[in-house]
Amino acid sequence: MTNYGIGQSVSRFEDPRLLRGKGCFVDDVNQLGQAHALMVRSPHSNARIRNINLEQALKAPGVLAIYTGEDVARDGLGTMKVNLPRKRPDGSPMFTRQHQGLSKSFVRYVGDPVALVIAENLLQAKDAAELIDIDYEPLPSVTDTAQAALPGAPAVWEECPDNISHVFEAGNAKATEEAFSKATHIVKRRYVISRVYAHYMQPRGVLAKYDEGDERYTIWADVQYPHRVRNALAENIFKIPEHRIRVIANDVGGGFGTKGWQYPEHRLMPWAARKLGRPVKWTCDRSEAILADEHARDNISEAEIALDAEGRILGLRVKTLANVGAYISSDRNLLSTFVNVHTLSGVYDIAAAHVHVTVLMSNTNSTAPYRGAGRPESIYVMERLLDDAARELNMDRVRIREINLIKPTAMPYLNPFGAKYDCGDFVRGMEIALKSAHYASFEERRKEALGRGKLRGIGIANAIERAASPNQHEFAEIRFNPSGSATVLMGTKAQGQGHETLYKQIVNERLGIDPGQVKFIDGDTDLVAFGMGTNGSRSTVVGGTALWKAADRIIEKGKKIAAHMLEASVDDIQFNKGVFEVVGTDKKVTLKDVAKTAFLAVKLPAGFEGGFYETATFVPAADTWPNGCHVCEVEIDAQTGEVKVVEYLVVDDVGTMINPAGVKGQIHGGVAQGLGQALMEQVVYERESGQLLTGSFMDYAMPRANDLPHIRVENNAVPTLLNPMGAKGAGEAGTVGAIPAIMNAVIDALAPAGVKSIDMPATSEKIWQALRQAKEKTTLSS
Amino acid sequence: MTTQTIQLKVNGNTVVTQIDPRTLLVQLIRDHLKLTGTHVGCDTAQCGCCTVHLNGLAVKSCSILALQANGQEVTTIEGLTQGDELHPVQNAFRECHGLQCGYCTPGMVMTTIQLLKHFPKPTDEQIREGLEGNICRCTGYENIVKSVKAAAGI
Amino acid sequence: MYALTYHQPATLPDALKSVEGDAKFLAGGQSLIQAMKLRMTSSSSLVDISKLSELKGISVTDSAVTVGAMTRHAEVALSVQIQQAIPALAKLAHGIGDPMVRNMGTLGGSLAYADPAACYPSALLALAGTVQTNERTISADNFFVNLYETCLKPGELIQSVSFQRPLQAAYIKFKHPASRLAMVGVFVARYKDGVRVGVTGCKTYAFRATQIEQLLGQKFSPDAIEGIELPWSDMLSDIHAGAQYRSALISILAARAVEQCLSS
């Protein structure tokens, strides 16, 4: 039998189905009699709605209904809630406004939904939508982060004229102040992290129906958190018992954090389906997706480090403006602004640090966690500061890192924000990376490239992130049936990470079951008892450990049944590779036999409870800390400014890898999303009007195959003791290191030409401009 | 709305039906024929998720009216093999972990088949250029390139 | 898209008769179907000309290459005749879009649609092209008149396009990172009596960079145009490339095209 256990790069069990085109994505699902929905969205970034005239639209052929915010309010649909107890700078309560589902009196961003058209087919819905006459009174708007913070900037909400929702601090301001007072050097910079959008290949969709007899809503949607969607709709929106809702997420075509649990469409479609008495289907065009979905990142940090004469960092101070959009519907919209600031100090031994985050509103889409969810932003600040400090102090970029890296002997390490790194060898990771990347000979490559008209640069980033947080349970169930095969039900939700395979590998490792004898189910709230979904690089660690524990319980119960079958004492039974045997004898019985017996009352001891299904709900004791060293080389065309990434290496520590090929795939994908943000992606609004300029793939640049280099991934695993597998989260690691590594490489390439800094995305035009300006400066000064 | 008759071969089967002339080939495939392996990923004909073969040539089914394929032969991902067998390109993707969420995958496979017809032993550059019309958000293309090379036997 | 009727005539006379009102000819559809899907343009009738034999074929003489309007980009790219007669033209076709676009898109369709970032318009200008329609012969310099607008009359159909064979030629394209069309594309063609330079991607329609043509006509060398920056006040600008940057790219790409000519 093939070895499927932990550590094997097993070919994925989900692949044949997906390769054959037999996947089940939400648009593939249809219900008899379904009608089609179209969302009508605001073309203005800020406006009062004076009137919505539906007269002509309602007469259009095929139209079944058109709903507006008035209907939503009349039917008493609720909103999400913000629970965080934050304050504004003056101590008053934080300011937030929740999205109403369909906006009624005002629209606050381009794409803000104002009406829902339902027709027999999509074309008819589109034709009808064109006949809706909405009288908007445009208002001044602000989309730019820096501008939103300026006094006198247009107010997103009249009641909050300074656009500040709240502030957040972490670390020790006093200790940091002291550290800075003792500094020999202070290096201070301003770093901008752009606004991007996930652009998964599958745009979102929702199909909903209401069963009058059952009094239940069934909702098919590509969500990463099916139980959280159910809970949100039950508790916040419809205010009904949770058992009256079923959410089904089958195959999800990418999520990256953004396919969240509070989108208006998740409430509007089931609501409309009930009103109409017909199933309602909504699918999102690509051009609608960027208007409809949550965006990501978007902050400006003023960051500084205090250094002593040797280049040791004494303190770190960061002030950040975070642009979270117009609506703050729940804590989800704020997560990226605070959950991962604790890794601002990275893998460096810094005694004192302080971060202050001002959370700003603007006339843009809400933001939400997207691959990294604040981790890339934190590591970006630290790694840029190190390179900038190295240049300013005329130090080698490796040297300044070497002196400041946390030594392996310092583990477990409490960082200045109170985060405790349990294990990791950052020194070894960087050593391996620099050797494998032939760092020592880089200057030769730089010289050679210059002869070809290319500016070559190298960038390093040491990434670390909190993963698999102890704030959320996860659920696993192993359910045998009377014929002895098993179903594994997980509360996580795959969007391409290969969960089916890795969970089957865990089950194979613990129970010796052939993957062909196991059915995997996730995503259906009727079938899976509970789950928090997949995000934050948690599924292997938290889901996998829950599964491990459920397997332990199966073994425990199985031993009792086996003991009875083998007429031995439970203490003499051992379990190994799917077989229960009496120690020291050849008396044995298989797990399958035991499972079958479990359902035969006559074969069990009197008073023994039969059945063979066990669950486990697990929450880790602490975060895990995946980390890695990224080394990147770029070549820039000295005339056109075009950047090409020519080398990319990650030496990663994600602890034990269940499926190494799968882990590497996650890292490749993460690197690509980092590259995209560093070099080409951005959500751009026109400054005056607030109009979205990156409305489709014609303007939002997506990395293609020829934008990516060959990505090498090597291993520096330090298994953690925090879970039985020794695994750390891996899903976001690639992105966390790629953004800083690539930007550092670009700036290193341009530094000899006198360019001091570039903000992402490092487009060819930006670089061409920077080179020209640097040349003019040199010409002027000479 | 007046419909028009279309007759064509899809995966070897003759299809005759009445359609709204605006029907795109991808809509015929997905909505009329319920072959949902071909996906729609964008509305500017850039993502390649909708790639099928028209008379053996890779085309984007979202940018073709179904009627343009009248009298011709269309092959979708479902038509590559019968039963449990995988086409050598599908097999290569499976062995090299060339897919994650699977949404872009049918398009990638259809494009790869065409790529290998033109370049039986392609260089990395030819592969990456040849895939410019297929966007993937999950894999970083690393294992897709590996899969294409494996399918080419290099 | 809006409602329409679809026709697929078997003969040229039938095709010309079918076109009335706002009817449009449909070649490969790679531009037109896209625009119609997004409701940016509409037509109540589409006349599919892909079956017309009069629009197919490639022929080569000592002085020119003539290509049928329905010839797909992939066919031009793979044509041994064109590869030998005007290799830069075959290479240009090979670089259009992606393999799927090249299997459907056509020369005639591309020219008639006149996308300001399409590649073929620059070749038409640089290779002193002539467009043969059912009514007349149009020279390249008169063909493009405005954004997405040519001098073709409603119902006028391109049948074939002729390109003059140059002594040397090269096409260099700098791709727009999002659309992957030409942000700037420069086609340089050297003839006995001078140099022609066709530029796409920079203005509302492709144009000849006459200043660069003159300088290269005097000295066909990259340094002859070093530092030249064409006036850019009427050049296109978007978030990926402003007008001044495009102007700078024209000179850079023209010089690289000249280098390519000289090294081949």
Image (cartoon, coloured by chain):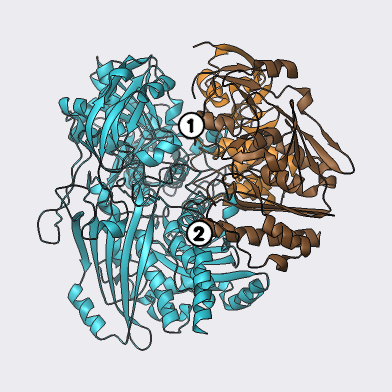
Chain letter of the residue carrying label 1: C
Q: CA distance from mark 2 to mark 1?
A: 28 Å
A34 horizontally vs A619: left or right: right
**Amino acid type, mark 1:** Leu
Q: Disc 2 marks which residue?
A: A763
Mark 2 chain: A
Percent position of residue A647, x then y: 58, 64
Residue A563 picture quarter: top left
- Tally the marks: 2
Is A56 located above or below residue C85 in the figure? above
User: Measured along the vertical axis of the image, is residue A679 above or below residue A69?
Assistant: below
State whether discs 2 and 1 lie on one chain. Answer: no
Q: Which mark is residue A85?
A: none
Image point (67%, 18%), residue name: C8
User: Is B1 placed above or below A294 here?
Assistant: above
Residue A97 placement, left or right of C1: left
Colour of chain B, in one word, is: orange
Residue C146, percent from left and from top? 58, 40
Q: Which mark is residue C38?
A: 1
The image shows residue A536 at horizontal and vertical percentages of 35, 51
Q: Residues within 10 Å of mark 1 (few under 14, many from 20)?
A: some
Residue A575 visible in the shown view: yes
Vertical placement of residue A717 versus C198, above or below: below
Mark 1 element type: loop
Instruction: Please identify which colour was used for chain A in the image.
Output: cyan
Nearest the eye: A572 or A379: A379
- Chain C, hue in figure: brown
